[in-house]
Amino acid sequence: MKRGTLIWDWPVRVFHLCFAGGWVAALAISLFSSDSGRVFPYHSLIGLALGWLVVLRIVWGFFGSKPARFGSFVSGPRRTVAYMNDALRFRETHFAGHNPGSAWVILAMIGLTIAQVVTGLFVGAGRRDFREVHEWLAYAMIGLIVVHLMGVALHTLRHRELIGLSMIDGKRMCGTESAISSSRPVVGVLGALFIAGFCYGIYRNYDAVRMTTKLPLVGVEVRIGESEADEEFE
């Protein structure tokens, strides 16, 4: 098998790039800036953008190219355990797309992102009891990212395949029977525009004095920082 089989379409690659970049930025702001600083509200704006990214990925998980659909890569517990057992013994099966282990990591990342957005909104609404939950979810996400990177490194060493490049050019080392017929560039461009439009909307509607923004299209106003009552309580 030669590396050159097109597996990942443009929508998946755009999501992966934006999702990874968004989480790195959100975590960096959270870890290295003060909660009361001028930069910290952008942590919340990025969080809202990540929530929108997940919505788009879920839609594509049902209507996208075959390797991108949840039904094509999500395995049951028994198959996942069997795969992990084989992987630990260095005899795992080579998968064209996501393997059973990485599939569950992806689902966990999506679930954690949704939970982070929800708890972040609760914190902004004055529910101080959700603050610690929000922080622990962030640590859980860091753990998943480490596990994911370790899996990528292990695969690279085990199969001598630079799997990280697949999310750039969409190609994998696998048989041509797993190839997709099109990289869906038009949908990829539209997806990028949807992401950019949402980000521009929440940034343009951001009120630094009231610490609020409005979600594009629906016009719902959300608070992106801790409430004044919460700050006074502290």
Image: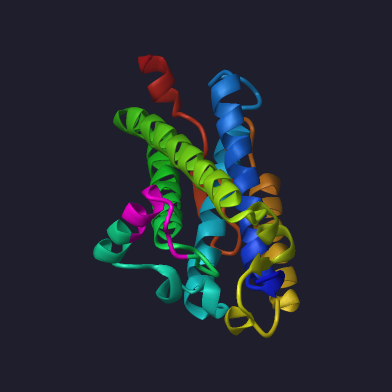
Q: How is the image coloured?
A: rainbow
User: With 179 as the anchor, is 119 left or right in this view?
Assistant: left
Q: Quadrant of residue 136?
A: top left
Task: Please give the name of the residue rendered at 50% of the width and 65% of the height, measured from the top-left corner.
Answer: 94
Task: Please give the name of the residue rendered at 29% of the width and 29% of the height, measured from the top-left corner.
Answer: 129
Q: Quadrant of residue 176?
A: bottom right
190 in relation to 215, above or below: below
Task: Give the camera-side residue of 231 and 199.
Answer: 199
Task: Please give the name of the residue rendered at 39% of the width and 23% of the height, measured from the top-left corner.
Answer: 230
- Residue 64 seen in this snapshot: yes
Task: Give the camera-side residue of 222 and 2.
Answer: 2
The x and y percentages for residue 114 are 42, 51
- Residue 210 seen in this snapshot: no
Residues rendered magenta in the picture? 83-93
Task: Give the camera-side residue of 49 and 95.
Answer: 95
Residue 86 is a magenta residue: yes
The x and y percentages for residue 167 are 66, 59
